[in-house]
Image (spheres, rainbow, N blue to C red):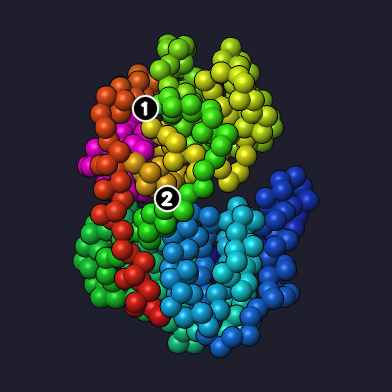
């Protein structure tokens, strides 16, 4: 399997420039061109203590961020290097002020692993959640560099625990320490014989608490809400949008206002949404007119959704039908109960929030209607905030161990 993995990575490395030419996808071009720059000159700091954080994408960065900020607070002399696998993470956080360098992780070949380790010269390395890059980890372990895995989440049905994944599983005991999100993952790894493990929880709880305490007011959303209940369709995909549109057909005059914040904010997709609900005369955030009284506002920007949850009474979060559930902790940190699709087995926070009565699964418009009725008829704000606060503290446990 190791040989097959190596061959596959090399094929990707060789064919990637061809795919970039043949397939006109901006993200694919960023994915390829960004890695070329990484190995040429990643513009690294000169401090002796270098902590390297690798995050697959934006979600993993949000899990690493409170750890980075706490480390810098405790020891400002530490240099922070951050690598991303995906363009979505890199492009949004390449200017992160606490990082001394931010760049793409090169493809996982033995040669690239040696090159990147030689360039960074990390004192310690922190991977987030699922990151297990075979040749990179082997090189780090061989050089005796401590490697940590934080906010890790393992399930028994993952390939790493199967016959063909054993070559990857053998890397887990070599981590300096693995910080797990929950008891299920801990019990699983303990049964497998691992001793370098502990339960810390999910660092994102600390992150959203900090965000909620520092939220900036948004005058446009404040005026739009106008003291009425507010539903936010956050980071939505077509499935969630279709359920909302079906609900609006059945209840054309809802007793609340609605903000639609789609994951895809391209002009074409925004136009598609506007056409489907044109009878409601929705406004775009970028063209908001306070003199109009329409009930639907489309958030066609990046960076305003987190603060928008401050004004919400309920949130319908996208990704629950694709198995890629977006961040439900942000709205919950403001005391906003959450609705989402049923496919979220990879996200233990959804199950935890369900047991606390602040998360509701929906599969169709009828179930969405029932969830709205439950939320509107019950004051769940304090329950949601208590859930977030009771799950905090992971950052301190991680930092006190790795610093």
Q: Quadrant of residue 251?
A: top left
Q: Are marks 2 and 1 in contact (CB under 8 Å)?
A: no
Q: Is residue 108 visible?
A: no
x%, y% of residue 245?
49, 19
Indicate whether 167 appears above or below 310: below
| Few, some or many residues within 10 Å of mark 1 (<14, 14–19, 20+) | some
Q: Is residue 357 magenta?
A: yes
Above/below status of 292 relative to 339: above
Q: Nearer the viewer, residue 105 or 389?
A: 389
Around disc 2, counting alpha carbons within 10 Å, would you say few (fewer than 14), some (14 to 19), or many (20 or more)?
Answer: some
Frontmost of labels 2 and 1 is 2
Hey, which quadrant is residue 197 in on the image?
bottom left
Per the rendering, the mark at residue 212 is 2
Which residue in the rendered view is the most extreme toward the right? 21
Q: Is residue 351 toward the left or the right of residue 20 in the image?
A: left
Secondary element at tag 1: loop
Q: Position of residue 138 (x, y in %)?
A: 48, 78
Looking at the rendering, the stretch of residues picked out in magenta corresponds to 336-362
Give the CA separation, mark 2 to mark 1. Answer: 29 Å
**304 over 134 or under it: above or below:** above
Q: Judge whether residue 37 can be spotted in this image.
A: yes
Residue at image x 26%, y 32%?
A: 379
Report which residue position mark 1 lands on.
363
Q: Residue at x 64, y 25 (%)?
A: 289
Which x, y percent locates residue 90?
Answer: 61, 59
SS of the residue at dot 2? helix
Residue 223 counted in the magenta span? no
- In the figure, residue 118 lies in which quadrant? bottom right
């Amino acid at each position: 399997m190791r040989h097959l993995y190596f061959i596959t990575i090399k094929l990707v490395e060789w064919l990637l420039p061809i795919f970039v030419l043949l397939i006109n996808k901006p993200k694919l071009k960023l994915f390829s061109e960004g890695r070329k720059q990484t190995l040429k000159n990643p513009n690294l700091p000169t401090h002796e203590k270098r902590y390297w954080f690798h995050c697959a994408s934006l979600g993993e960065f949000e899990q690493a961020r409170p750890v980075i900020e706490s480390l810098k607070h405790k020891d400002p002399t530490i240099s922070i290097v951050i690598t991303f696998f995906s363009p979505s993470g890199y492009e949004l956080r390449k200017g992160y002020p606490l990082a001394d360098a931010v760049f793409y992780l090169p493809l996982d070949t033995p040669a690239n692993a040696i090159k990147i380790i030689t360039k960074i010269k990390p004192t310690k390395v922190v991977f987030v959640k699922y990151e297990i890059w075979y040749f990179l980890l082997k090189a780090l372990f061989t050089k005796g560099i401590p490697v940590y895995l934080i906010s890790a989440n393992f399930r028994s049905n993952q390939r790493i625990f199967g016959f063909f994944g054993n070559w990857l599983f053998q890397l887990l005991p070599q981590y300096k320490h693995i910080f797990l999100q929950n008891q299920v993952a801990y019990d699983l790894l303990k049964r497998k014989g691992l001793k370098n493990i502990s339960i810390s929880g999910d660092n994102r709880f600390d992150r959203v608490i900090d965000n909620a305490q520092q939220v900036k007011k948004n005058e446009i959303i404040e005026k739009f809400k106008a003291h009425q209940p507010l539903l936010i369709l956050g980071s939505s995909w077509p499935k969630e949008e279709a359920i909302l549109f079906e609900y609006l057909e059945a209840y054309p005059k809802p007793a609340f206002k609605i903000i639609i914040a789609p994951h895809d904010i391209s002009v074409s997709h925004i136009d598609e949404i506007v056409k489907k609900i044109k009878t409601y005369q929705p406004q775009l955030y970028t063209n908001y007119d306070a003199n109009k009284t329409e009930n639907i506002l489309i958030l066609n920007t990046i960076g305003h959704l987190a603060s928008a949850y401050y004004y919400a009474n309920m949130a319908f979060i996208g990704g629950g039908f694709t198995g890629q559930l977006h961040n439900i902790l942000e709205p919950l940190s403001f005391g906003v109960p959450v609705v989402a699709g049923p496919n979220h087995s990879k996200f233990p926070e959804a199950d935890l929030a369900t047991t606390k009565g602040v998360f509701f699964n929906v599969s169709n418009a009828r179930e969405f209607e029932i969830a709205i009725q439950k939320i509107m008829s019950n004051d769940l704000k304090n329950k949601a905030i208590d859930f977030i606060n009771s799950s905090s503290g992971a950052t301190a446990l991680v930092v006190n161990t790795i610093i």
